Amino acid sequence: DTVLTQSPALAVSPGERVTISCRASESVSTGMHWYQQKPGQQPKLLIYGASNLESGVPARFSGSGSGTDFTLTIDPVEADDTATYFCQQSWNDPTFGGGTKLELK
Amino acid sequence: QVQLKETGPDLVQLTQTLSITCTVSGFSLTTYNVHWVRQPPGKGLEWMGAMWNGGGTDYNSAFKSRLSISRDTSKSQVFLKMNSLQTDDTAKYFCARQGINYGSYPFDYWGQGVMVTVSS
């Protein structure tokens, strides 16, 4: 299985720029996607194909990377961005990262 | 309007079988793949398996032979059945549609999930 590793938590102030990383145990090309999940809700697709913004998602969100290293950037962070962010690869059988919980100071 | 809705029991007894139905609308099961993903309380997401648009299936090896996925296209329903449940199967179970117009294959729509507790 392709293992995806994320840092568990981050805390930032509103208005700042935050980067959330995801490292794959093997190359997944650009088959990486990012989701936002708020408590009690289902995940919501933000970024697909490593760098493409899903329709309706604010342009404050962006993604980059290929191969094994990927980044989700939120700039500027808003209070409503408090959530857990998951990466997911679709290059092989789907796997998810453990999630990064974003808290606002 | 694309929608997915999971229905199933809140509580299942230890060693018993879990059955969940995902009813979809706004798209055809013969065009889109539908996957099952679960999430234990306070933990991450785990892919369980897929129902392909052509009728085939694929499973996470972690579930070995415990898991079965099927569908009824006339009712726009996908079924998950998992036997020999243990307490660590307590989780919220989601069905999700896999997008096809992205150049890659993200899960673009998700159901709200059904929380299942395995009780001894």
Image (cartoon, rainbow, N blue to C red):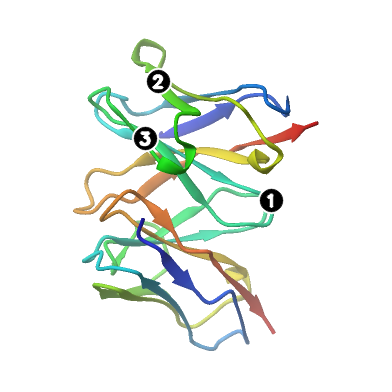
Among all residues in the image, which is located at the extreme right?
A: B120
* Disc 3 residue crowd, few under 14, some 14–19, many 20+, Cα 10 Å: many
Q: Secondary structure at mark 2?
A: strand
* Disc 1 residue crowd, few under 14, some 14–19, many 20+, Cα 10 Å: few
What residue do we see at 50% from left, 29% from top? B66
Could you tell me how far apart the alpha carbons at marks 3 and 2 are, in whole angstroms?
9 Å
- Do the CB atoms of the residues marked 3 and 2 lie less than 8 Å apart? no
Could you tell me how far apart the alpha carbons at marks 2 and 1 are, in whole angstroms?
26 Å
Residue behind mark 3: B50
* Marks 2 and 1 on same chain: yes
What subunit carries mark 2? B
What residue do we see at 34% from left, 69% from top? A25
The amino acid beneath tag 1 is Pro
Residue behind mark 2: B70
Comes first in the chain, label 1 or label 3: 1
Left or right side of A84 for B53: left
Q: Nearer the viewer, residue B16 or A68?
A: B16
The amino acid beneath tag 3 is Ala
